[in-house]
Amino acid sequence: MSKKGTYYVTTPIYYPSAKLHIGHTYTTVAADVLARFKRFTGYDVKFLTGTDEHGEKIQKAAQEKGVTPQQHVDEIVSDIKEIWKSMEISYDVFLRTTGEDHKKAVQNIFQKLYDQGDIYKSSYEGWYCTPCESFWTETQLKEDKGCPDCGRPAHLAKEEAYFFKLSQYQDRLIQYFEDHPEICYPESRKNEMLSNFLRPGLEDLCVSRTSFDWGIQVPFDPKHVIYVWFDAVCNYITTLGYGSDNKEEYDKYWPANVHIVGKEIVRFHTIIWPAILMALGEPLPKMVYGHGWILFGSDKMSKSKGNIVYPEPLIERYGIDALKYFLLREFTFGHDGNYTNRVFLNRLNSDLSNDLGNLVSRSIAMIEKYNDGIVPEAKAEGEFDQNLREVVTSAAEKVEEAIDKLQFHDGLEGIWKIIRRVNKYIDETTPWILAKDEENKATLDTVMYNLADSIRIISVLIKPFMEATTKKIWTQLGAEGEVGLQWKDTMEFGKLPAGTKVKKGEALFPRLDVEKEVEALEKINEEYLQQINGGKKEEEAIEIEPKEEITIDDFSKLELRAVEIIKAEKHPKADRLLVLQVQVGQEVRQVVSGIAEHYKPEDLVGKTVILVANLKPVKLRGVESRGMILAAANDEKLVLGTLDEKIPTGTLIS
Ligand code: ME8
């Protein structure tokens, strides 16, 4: 075991029901940085992620695709692993809840709780939200019978079921919250759990289902499958061998140091999961951190609305480190944040290209220019040197403190403070002026050394966040082996050996033309969305506002006829209008239609469309119109209603 002990960090295990987006990337990147940081600072780390593969939602998604649930999850899981690989996520275990070991262990846990009376059989009637796989009581529902977690409509469901005696753990949980505030961070979420759930009173939890079968069977009653959330939370310990014959890893790593989750699943992790652990007589996780959501235009990301961002196009164009940096720097962990391409690109330009990239490139260029690329010895002490060294070597402690509290944005801000300090040092010492006079050589050498060593320290500080960039800086700096490149070395100045040869490389983060990139990204994201939707762009579900009902008699008053457009021209006085001549049986009619922004006159001739033939004639900007052509229209688009085969003009439509 390492000197510092163990560190166990987990992400939620994600549903393989759809492709993961940058919300999932956010959680995983945070856990990855934490894991990397802990490994780097000497801990024996276990970093778990995985997939939560059972439940009605997955079964339904598979049915819709016409494949078995197992085929469905296998396909998406391999996609998920692929994205984590391309992002160099350093997980140690990828747990799948369809794995045999996990299934057996969950059954053992369920059996144990049943045998000791913590699980009992009864029947359940309640409000069920299928997307969240959650039962709710009437009082918990929103006013419109929506699920309190996701807002979507819940429906009444009744089934014979097994229950976990959650209510019995209420007092112990409240006590635990009081004694161990870190069981639920940030503070605001802890208060929410206490006031919304724990204090009003817990009800026993329904932990089995009979309405579908894609799940782990209750070992002693196989027509029931175990509730997917019970199955899922157990992953954190089954992965370590709990519930099997070999729990060596469990003894080593449990309790987890932190479960990182999104805010919507804090309740499962700070109430249900701890109660299960209490029932098992096992220790509780040391910390559960519920971070905020990444929103898209103030909305929760949703594929069906098309307001979703996937990591792949971003990392392909700007690199993994750019995305990781952005996610952890832009958003305050714990709060919601809004994603836009512009915010992303501005952040890249200001912090990565201007601050970090520039510092490295101009420092290396100066060492090449003023000292043939050799890092000189620091021989003289200048006015700004002491302060520079103090600032640069003082960052590590604060960064460590921030990361321990999962305040990644603060950690990064701490590092960027020193990057900006070092950039300022260049302006203060003006090496280009020093270089003009040979007498200043010792001072110039010192400035060059201080720059090189500051960059060494910065490169080590950013390593847990941006490993690839660190390696690129080391190559440019000529830093080799382990000397001066450990975390503790960031607290000491002067570790870069003088005489090291630097070598200018490509710009770490080329400066971006934000306007151009915004345009390019919008196009790329849209194309990507279309590609993963199999060429179809998924459309936003329109909210239907019903009109007053009509009878068949009302409808029969309408005279709808198939007509062919035989001539179309612009309206002489109105840009939005076209004047159409349409053939209706023997007759030719003139109809004025507001479709000029959507159709060119020449494209209309020959189309068979639908005419409301008995509409009272009107004059539109001086031109008579006898009837109206039907079209579907929203704010952006207008499409004429056409008939899908030729039919004689004048034919009645009913
Ligand atoms: O809830 N912003 O899985 P899931 C930030 N299987 N984070 C987001 C996000 C967003 N817009 N969208 C998703 C489940 N996430 C269960 C978990 S654990 C025992 C079982 C992240 O696929 C965030 O971490 O719906 C959130 O909690 C998680 O993805 C939900 O993933």
Image (cartoon, grey):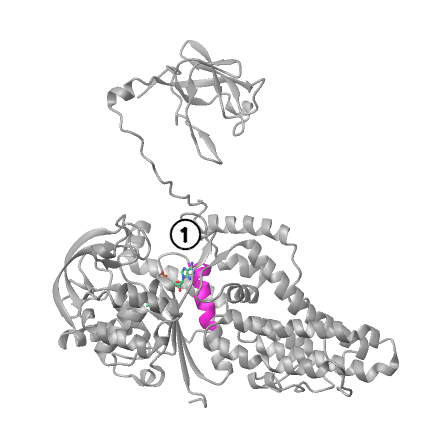
Q: Secondary structure at mark 1?
A: loop
Residue 258, placed above or below residue 558 = below
Q: Say which quarter of the image contains residue 286.
A: bottom left
Q: Please, which residue is most extreme toward the left here?
A: 122
Label 1 Cα crowd, 10 Å radius (few <14 / some 14-19 / many 20+): some
Q: Say which quarter of the image contains residue 52.
A: bottom left
Q: Give the amino acid at mark 1.
A: Ser
Residue 536 percent coordinates (x, y): 44, 44
User: Where does the magenta region start and end?
Assistant: 20-32
Residue at (19% x, 51% y) in the render? 156
Residue 227, placed above or below residue 608 = below
The residue that mark 1 highlights is: 302
Q: Say which quarter of the image contains residue 254.
A: bottom left
- The answer to whether residue 125 of the structure is visible from this angle is yes
Residue 362, placed above or below residue 210 = below
Asked whether, in this view, residue 428 is left or right of residue 638, the answer is: right
Residue 231 percent coordinates (x, y): 26, 68
Which quarter of the figure is the C terminus placed in? top left
Where ligand 1 lies, by quadrant? bottom left
Please state which of residues 431 and 523 is positioned toward the viewer in this rendering.
431
Label total for image: 1
